[in-house]
Each structure stands twice: as structure tokens, then as C-alpha cells.
Amino acid sequence: MNICVFLSAADLDERYTGPARDFARLLGKAGHTLVWGGSDTGLMKVVADGVEEAGGRLVGVSVDFLAHKARPGVDEMVVAKDLAERKALLLAKSDAIVVMVGGTGTLDEATEILELKKHGKHSKPVVVLNTAGFYDGLKDQFRRMEEEGFLPVPLAGLALFADDAPTALAHLEENIASR
């Protein structure tokens, strides 16, 4: 399975890198492919290292203005002309999506993927890996949107908020197998 992971390229605290590394190792050990932003910095590097060390494949999708940060020696690397093309390629190359901790870029990617799913433009499983409660506020906002009629699709139909790596990967594997 090709699993797209949206996440930060920043250097982060162990409370975020540890769980990300755990997820990456599970992904690699299960023989899955990481599809990610292609960067060799920060949390992106941590996850790519973990997948690679555990025997998984790496498919990077960078963008022109970040190509100088691209990880060398991956199984496949594509350089998109802009962020819109990058997001489209990441979705096209994946069977499932995981959103890990990140900033505005990660949030942009996550909300676009959920918006596309809401409108039936893809049916891929999406998991928000809620490490250390990082996305509690976002989960509350989505629940409010659902309760107040702003979300025409139940939140459970859009994404699972998972607190740990085994739950996230099990959900993806189960939902890919049932598609």
C-alpha cells in the first residue's frame, strides 16, 4: 500500500518525533511505501529514515522551490512546479493518507484532502494521527461543523482521529482491504 503522509519538515521535540518514528517503522515493516513531501529535513527526515530502515520504499514529491531539500537516493522522486501540483501528485500516488503534526502547509494539505473526499473526488482512507493531542482543537472544530450543519458528511466518513501509530495503520489496512 502507498501511504501518503502529510507532516512538518521542522525539527521537533521527541514527543512528536518518537511517535512519528514508531509509525514509520510499522509502515516499513509491513512492506508499505511512504509517499511524502520528499524533504530530508525535520520530521519528514525522521519518518523517511524510519520507513527506509524498516525495509519500506520511499516515493518523494517535492516542489521546485524546495527541491534543494529533497532526500537523495529514494526509490522515486518527482519535483512538482507548484504546491497545487504537488498535492495532486501526492494524492494520485497514494492509497491512503495520514496527517501528522505540522504547520500551515500540513493543515492546507489536510483540509484540501478532506474537502475533496467530502465531494466524492476520492474515497481513500484518511487518518489524523493526533500525537500528544496536537489535533484536539481541530477535532473539536470538525465536530462543531458537523453538529451545526456545516459538514454534510459525517466526520467519521471523512477521517479517523487516531491517538497512536498501531491504531492508525490498522485502520488504513482494514479500509484499503475493504475497498
Image (tube, rainbow, N blue to C red):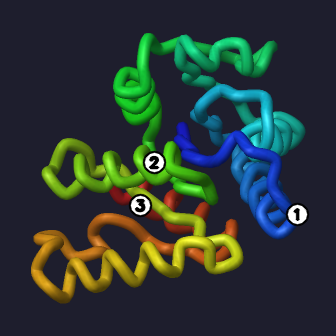
| Residue 16 percent location from the top left of the image | 77, 63
Query: Does the residue at mark 3 contact the one at mark 2 (Cβ under 8 Å)?
Result: yes
* Residue 14: numbered disc: 1
Q: Which residue in the protein does label 2 denote?
A: 96
Tell me: residue 141, above or below residue 50: below
Question: Which mark is first along the chain, 2 or 1?
Answer: 1
Q: Is residue 133 visible?
A: yes
Query: Does the residue at mark 1 contact the one at mark 2 (Cβ under 8 Å)?
Result: no
What kind of residue is marked 2?
Answer: Ala
What kind of residue is marked 1?
Answer: Glu
| Residue 110 percent location from the top left of the image | 42, 52
Q: CA distance from mark 3 to mark 2?
A: 9 Å
Q: As drawn, is 138 to the left or to the right of 64?
A: left
Residue depicted at x 31% and y 83%: 143
Q: Nearer the viewer, residue 87 or 174?
A: 87
Q: Which residue in the protein does label 3 denote?
A: 175
Q: As drawn, is 93 to the left or to the right of 12?
A: left
Tell me: residue 28, above or below residue 82: below
In the current view of this chain or complex, which residue is farthest to the bottom?
Answer: 147
What kind of residue is marked 3?
Answer: Asn
| Secondary element type, mark 1 | helix
Q: Is residue 55 visible?
A: no
Q: CA distance from mark 1 to mark 3?
A: 30 Å
How many numbered discs? 3
Mark whose residue sits in front, 1 or 2? 1
Q: Quadrant of residue 32?
A: top right
Question: Which mark is first along the chain, 2 or 3?
Answer: 2
Q: Quadrant of residue 53?
A: top right
Residue depicted at x 81% and y 55%: 12
Mark whose residue sits in front, 3 or 2? 2
| Secondary element type, mark 2 | strand
Label 3 Cα neighbours within 10 Å, binned few <14 / some 14-19 / many ≥20: some
